[in-house]
Amino acid sequence: MPSATVAPSPVHASHPAPSGRRPRKAPAQRITNNVTGYAFLIGAVLCFALFSWYPMVRGVVMSFQRTRRGVTTWVGWDNYERIFQDPSFWTAWKNTAYFTVLALVLGYAVPFVVAIIFNELRHARGYLRVLVYLPVMLPPASALFLFKYYAYDPSEAGLFNAILKFLHLPTSQWMQSTSMAVPAMVLASTWMNMGGAVLIYLAALQNIPGSLYEAAELDGAGLFKRIRHVTIPQTKLILSLMAMLQVVATMQLFIEPLILANGAGTQDSATSVAYLIYQHGFFQNDLNGAAALGVIMLVVLGGFSAAYVRLSSKQD
Amino acid sequence: MTTRELGPRTLLSHTQLTRGKGPAIYWTLLIAIVVIFTLAFIGPLYWMVTSALKTGQEVAQTPPTLFPANPDPQNYVDAWNNLTLGKLLFNTIYYAGGALLFQLVLDTAAAYALSKLRPIFGNVVLGAMLATLMIPAMVLIVPQYLTAIDLPILHISLLDSPFAIWLPAVANAFNIFLLKRFFDSVPQDLIYAGIVDGAGPLRILWSIILPISRPILGVVSIFAVTAVWKDFLWPKLVEPSPETRTISVGIYAFAGGTPQNVVIAAAVIAAIPTVIFFLIFQRSIMAGLTTGAVKE
């Protein structure tokens, strides 16, 4: 056991002022300091209070109330029961879950593979990076009308159908087909959003020290073994973080059904939980039901985050 | 390939890239990748711009034509006039500019307070701000809307007012976080030097911190502007009148009763400002994206 060779001097012990910290101030000055501090904070704090913190509480409260003709009463779990009985509720969750899973496969694996390929290229990297990020900058409404009118046109004049026909493959009804609606939305959404993920993965890949690959190569590891044993472990943190962010983002699927499918789509084939919130809140005059739906979505996401934290702490 | 071109070691070794069939395979793959990605990412945009130059008849033709037979800007003219795009563009720029100004003033001040002034419970405030990042926007949309149409205590409605976009834009935890982290890296000695010279907190922020913080202010500005430009549901709800709509919402509102080509022409016009903005600021945008995500 190391003996106390450098015993703290009594002066230090009685004045715990660790170096790098501000020196202690007189009480009066501390008060002015706090007042100035909050004077600088107040604008942002008010905006957060009005548009984030208060709505959060209000949403939960509203989900247990019902407002009819201006009179608000507490109704317990009534809103939740009504929401659970809505047949669209389960379809919406089924579609959202299907979208989330497909988006994870496409929108998560594809950008990673693309980033790995880009990182191996010694030329045109800047051009390719601008290219994949370009759709991210488009207003989603613009991009989605492009998909709706040209790519997913169910006749043979549609771009995708023209390509399929050219390849002698059967054409599709796209958004009008009940089975293709969700995959078509995933495709459009991945095209619009993958740029951000590609750039983040690229930055992570550039941080991997080259010596690790050299060592793996000396051990006789081939290309795929190097990816499995060097690339993936070295980017694990950012990969798992992005998976979580992706789930949060895809669960909010809204503008894709709204524009591509004019809302819920054929037989609710494109409806989503977020779209249902919008429907209840702004068309069915059921703000309380919409609030309950919001709380349900938050609980599901909370469950996901908890599982994520559990899993990632177990692995370490 | 020269050694400089080879750059740092990645998955593939320099030997693999330079010996034997390496270069041939590399160049073939490079060209294939450039062609595929250009088709996949510029192709649709090309399609969008040129299809809007076609007549309705030509668009419905099978197989689709690659070039417009008689390029006719009439769709663009119709879009501009019938959809009042000038007005919509002005609105969107006005909202984006205002949101930028509000965020630069209020979020910078807040980040400065949290980073340098550190009042009591500052960390609690920061934590409460960061917690909002975990809450999906859709969960809050209804209570947020109700708040905007009837502000607590004041009982005024922000409906169709630009403040309905500007004020919620300030509640941006990610930008405050980026700013705070950058301010944290400003040496404390500089601040002390300012205090010794008799500078107050505002003076220190203005003359010492902000000049050093130009790169991060650029990143935050870009995020602020693009967020407003791309947003759809919130402006659709709080700016419902034809006079106050944003361009995305306006196009959506008109889409039902307008020929497809005119809608696409309008979508092209709506996308031009962001695309130009991106091409000008692409370096800062990409740098900002990765500082936010990868560092640490």
Image (cartoon, helix red, strand yellow):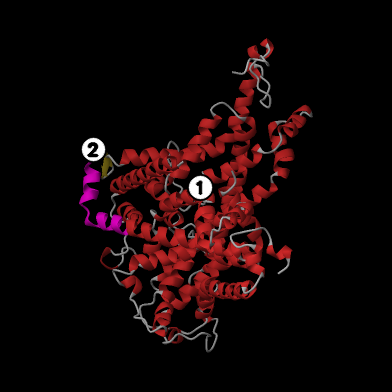
Residue A237: mark: 1
Residue occupying the far right of the picture: B197
> Where, by quadrant of the figure, is residue B285 drawn?
bottom right
- The residue indicated by pointer 2 is A76
Instruction: Choose between B239 and A189: the one closer to the eye.
Output: A189
Residue A66 is situated, as x and y percent measured from the top left of the image, at: 26, 42
Is residue A136 at all visible to an observer of this figure?
A: no
Q: Secondary structure at mark 2?
A: loop
Q: Main secondary structure of the magenta part?
A: helix
Residue at the top extreme, as displayed: A10
Chain where mark 1 sits: A
Determine the residue positioned at 33% across, 76% down.
A173
Check disc 1 and give the amino acid type.
Leu
Magenta segment: does it hold A197? no
- Answer left or right for B62 relative to A2: left
Instruction: State the residue at coordinates (35%, 73%).
Output: A174
Residue A34 is tagged as: none
Q: Chain of mark 2?
A: A
Note whether residue B138 is visible. yes
- Which span of residues is magenta-colored? A74-95
Quarter of the image holding residue A64?
top left
